[in-house]
Image (tube, helix red, strand yellow):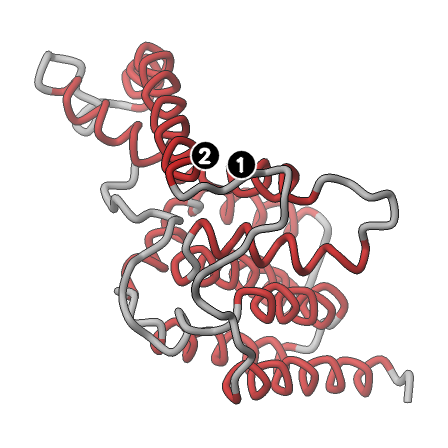
Amino acid sequence: MQSNKYFGSFYPVESSIHKLNPVMKFICLFLFLIPIIGSMSLKLHVVILFFILMMMYSSNVPLRFYFDMLYGLRYIYIIILFALASKGLTLEEALVIIMKVSSVIEYLTLIFYTTAPSELKYGIEKTLTPFNLFNFNLGRLSNIIVGIIRFFPLLFTTEYSVLKNASERGLDYFHSDIIARINVLLSSFKNTLRLTLEKIKKEKFASELRMYKITKFRTNLRTNNVGFLDLLIAVVHIVFIASYVIEVGII
């Protein structure tokens, strides 16, 4: 369980990454997924991972917060490794796939830590606008997407608080065997879910206090300008795509 109260959610601190345009963050995310999904070049994925680490360092968010996310998924990595071994993949191919998964997780975590919920909604609305061929209510859609994004970090952090308090009443999760831990998790899940939903409602109420209406496009008092750093990071992503194109021999 995660004790970090900012686990997967906005970390309020000043940094160059926090100041990036939220729309450009999502555009860069889409550009980032092209070489990540398609390329099997170990060298390219090492460079991409190094670039993500540089952005993580520049975000002024404690690095242990990012690594907590990977540590929390350690059992999933073990399952992936066994699955890859059963398929007869080489060590290099398995390493590339692990790096793919790690890069996507850390990139998404970087966006969540450096983008306020209101900015996430704004970025989603504006990014999806050109693709809104069926005139969906993007305000409501972005609200749902951010709600889903916020739900799981809140669930994990709330679960930790519940388990910590339960241990004081004799239901010790932290010093038990695997069977006892499963029993404690099952017995506390109902209370955890209730508390998490209450927190979601409070966040929704906070949006209403800001006079945000899901039936209209989001407006901000702060102007979300596209700066030099936004363009520079976008160019780096395009270079990654070009490297992938050269790798597969399209040009």
Residue 77, position as x, y percentages in the image: 50, 49
Q: How many marks?
A: 2
The image position of residue 36, as x and y in percent, is 67, 68
Q: Nearer the viewer, residue 95 or 216?
A: 216
Task: Tell me the crowding category of disc 2: few under 14, some 14 to 19, or many 20 or more residues within 10 angstroms, Cα based.
Answer: some
Farthest-out residue, right = 250
Residue 231, quarter of the rendered image: bottom right
Whether 131 is drawn above or below 172: the answer is below
Going 68% across and 47% down the picture, which residue do you hit?
Answer: 86
Mark 1 lies on a secondary structure that is helix
Q: Position of residue 93 (x, y in %)?
A: 67, 66
Q: Is residue 206 above or below residue 87?
A: above
Amino acid type of the residue that numbered disc 2 sits on in the rendered structure: Phe
Q: Is residue 199 above or below residue 41?
A: above
> Horizontally, is 208 left or right of 188 in the view?
right
Q: Amino acid at mark 1?
A: Ile
Disc 1: CA contacts within 10 A as few (<14), some (14-19) or many (>=20): few
Q: Is residue 75 above or below residue 175?
A: below
Question: Where is residue 42 drawn, in percent x and y?
Answer: 63, 77
Q: Is residue 37 left or right of residue 55?
A: right
**Tag 2's secondary structure?**
helix
Left or right, 187 with reference to 163: right
At horizontal 29% and vertical 30% (from top left) the residue drawn is: 158
Query: Residue 148 got which mark?
Result: 1
**Residue at the spot of label 2:** 151
What is the spatial separation of the Cα atoms under label 2 and label 1, in whole angstroms?
5 Å
Q: Is residue 101 left or right of residue 192?
A: right
Disc 2 + disc 1, Cβ < 8 Å: yes
Identify the residue at horizontal 17%, vertical 27% (top origin).
Answer: 164
What numbered label is drawn on residue 219? Answer: none
